[in-house]
Amino acid sequence: MKNGKLKLIKIKSDEINIYPLKKLIEKGEKKLEKNKIKESKLKIKWIISNILKTSIKNLSLYQDYKLSKKENQLFNNYIKRLLNHEPVQYIIKETEFFGLDFLLDNNVLIPRIETERIVDFAIDSIKKYNYKNIIDIGTGSGIISICIAKKIDQNISILAIDSNINALKIAKKNAIKHKVNSKIKFLHFNILKDKLKKNFDLIVSNPPYVSIKEYNQLDKDIRFFEPKSALTDYDNGTIFYEKFSIKGLEWLNKNGSIVLELGGQKHSIKIKKKFFKRGWKNIKLINDFNGDTRILIAQN
């Protein structure tokens, strides 16, 4: 108060939230939709549930809740990042895969639902052939190895390798989070340059399969934020598969298997030909949940 008059402080509506949560979600969704951000409603719910430390399913219990000043500042920051095309998973630093929650940052790819098919077939192979020694090449956040370790009760040993040491840090945290770190050994290793000194029963991998030409046409949220070296081989998208088709036969024990993610119909035909040429047996191409050719399975 000055000279007997009350000095009013003007507060912008986006600085302190005056809306109940239900209305805030609606306004946030409209703002994202106006800027052509995909899956806007789901993304708003993800960031709200992250701020409130609750699940999306429980948000219905908070419909009349109003964010605190600190929570609202965080909400506005998240919205700005979404408007800048940053993936919501990097903003909240977590994602869901195979029914499990995983930590992640921009050192690792955001897992896609298609990759769950690799886990399914890897688990089937382990059970069917009683495989003990598995290698996960290009483990990233560790999702494939960790899901296998969580779902397999039998005694197995997994070597999870990656050329990105920062990705391995995330993978190790995820293994500890899911209490499977005793089953998985993480190793900083470049499969194109370093030499494997051990044989395995099963090879699983989701290698970089996007050609450099295709990479330059990807959406902004992928090109600007996800690790380039985990997406593309900086060539035609087949370099890793060429290596696997040749060296994989040496890396596997007798009656071993390989399970690989592929880049769709045209890519899968190229890769199948490579494996057939090198003498692999029982080569199968399998579709993902959308009907696209996504998985190659073969035996030595």
Image (cartoon, rainbow, N blue to C red):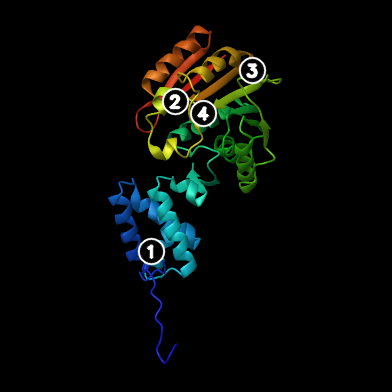
What is the quadrant of residue 294 in the picture? Answer: top left
Upstream in sequence: badge 2 or badge 3: 2
Which residue position is annotated with label 2? 210
Upstream in sequence: badge 4 or badge 1: 1
Upstream in sequence: badge 1 or badge 3: 1
Give the label on residue 251, or none: 3
Using the image as rendered, state which of residue 83 and residue 59 is in the foreground. Answer: 83
What is the quadrant of residue 253 in the picture? Answer: top right
Give the vertical position of 21 relative to 256 (above or below). Answer: below
For the residue labelled by badge 4, is the local secondary structure a helix, a strand or a loop? loop
**Front label number (2 vs 3):** 2
**Front label number (3 vs 4):** 4
Which residue position is annotated with label 4? 206
**Front label number (2 vs 1):** 2
**Front label number (4 vs 1):** 4
Cα distance, mark 1 to mark 3?
A: 52 Å
Q: Is residue 17 visible?
A: yes
Marks 4,1: beta carbons within 8 A = no
For the residue labelled by badge 3, is the local secondary structure a helix, a strand or a loop? helix
- The quarter of the image holding the C terminus is top right
Using the image as rendered, state which of residue 79 and residue 11 is in the foreground. Answer: 11
Marks 4,2: beta carbons within 8 A = no
Q: Residues within 10 Å of mark 3 (few under 14, many from 20)?
A: many
Upstream in sequence: badge 2 or badge 1: 1
Give the label on residue 60, or none: 1
| Amino acid identity at mark 3 | Trp
